[in-house]
Image: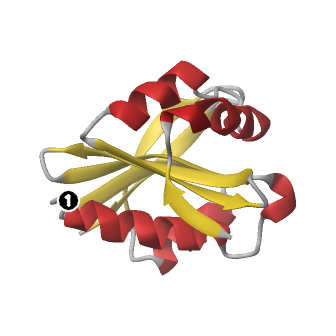
Amino acid sequence: MIIRRMLADDAGKVAELEAANFSQPWKAKDFEKAAEDKDVLYLVAEEDENIIGCCGVRNLLGEGEITNVSVHASCRRKGIAENLLRRLLDEGMQMGMTDFTLEVRSSNLAAVRLYEKLGFKTEGVRSGFYSRPKEDAFIMWKH
């Protein structure tokens, strides 16, 4: 597996991965814009020229907002998300980010555990944040 920066040419494949995993996925054009934005960093995990995972962070005045974490269903529980996130956090710090935040579905216990393992703590709840289905989001921070 190779972890590398996402290129604008990857946008279609990353959008397909998102569509397979989320009820309200980003579109290819959203990922194209992200790949070209100097304040945004997206990484992809690639195996045999297939994108099997992705994650991204947006630099908001030194705070990193993690926007997407997605792994192909057949590749889960293999440490891909953890490896992507560790690299994302390292590169985010090199870009000047000192704190990181994200929202996660309150029912996504596997993701919550992973984020806790990486040093994130739940510091709030956004009621009804997600739709399809409607659900609360935990607001997690790593300081």
Asked if residue 73 lies left or right of residue 34, the reply is right
Q: Residue sitting at 52 percent across and 52 percent down?
A: 55
Asked if residue 39 lies left or right of residue 126, the reply is left
Q: Is residue 17 above or below residue 1?
A: above
Q: Nearer the viewer, residue 35 or 88?
A: 35
Badge 1 marks a residue whose secondary structure is loop
In which quarter of the view is residue 12 placed?
top right
Q: Is residue 80 above or below residue 19?
A: below
Q: Is residue 87 above or below residue 95?
A: below
Q: Residue sitting at 51 percent across and 44 percent down?
A: 137
Pointer 1 residue: 97
* Image x and y of residue 105, in percent: 59, 47
Structural crowding at the residue carrying mark 1, measured as other residues with C-alpha within 10 Å and reported as few (<14), some (14–19) or many (≥20) = many
* Image x and y of residue 107, in percent: 67, 53
Q: Residue sitting at 79 percent across and 37 percent down?
A: 20
Asked if residue 39 lies left or right of residue 74, the reply is left
* Image x and y of residue 71, in percent: 70, 55
From where the camera sits, is residue 112 visible?
A: no
Task: Give the colour scheme of this rendering.
Answer: secondary structure
Q: Residue sitting at 79 percent across and 60 percent down?
A: 48
In which quarter of the view is residue 78 placed?
bottom right
From where the camera sits, is residue 63 visible?
A: yes
Quarter of the figure that contains the N terminus? bottom right
Q: Is residue 110 above or below residue 138?
A: below
Label total for image = 1
Q: Amino acid at mark 1?
A: Met
Q: Nearer the viewer, residue 113 or 127?
A: 113
Asked if residue 62 lies left or right of residue 76, the reply is left
* Image x and y of residue 22, in percent: 70, 36
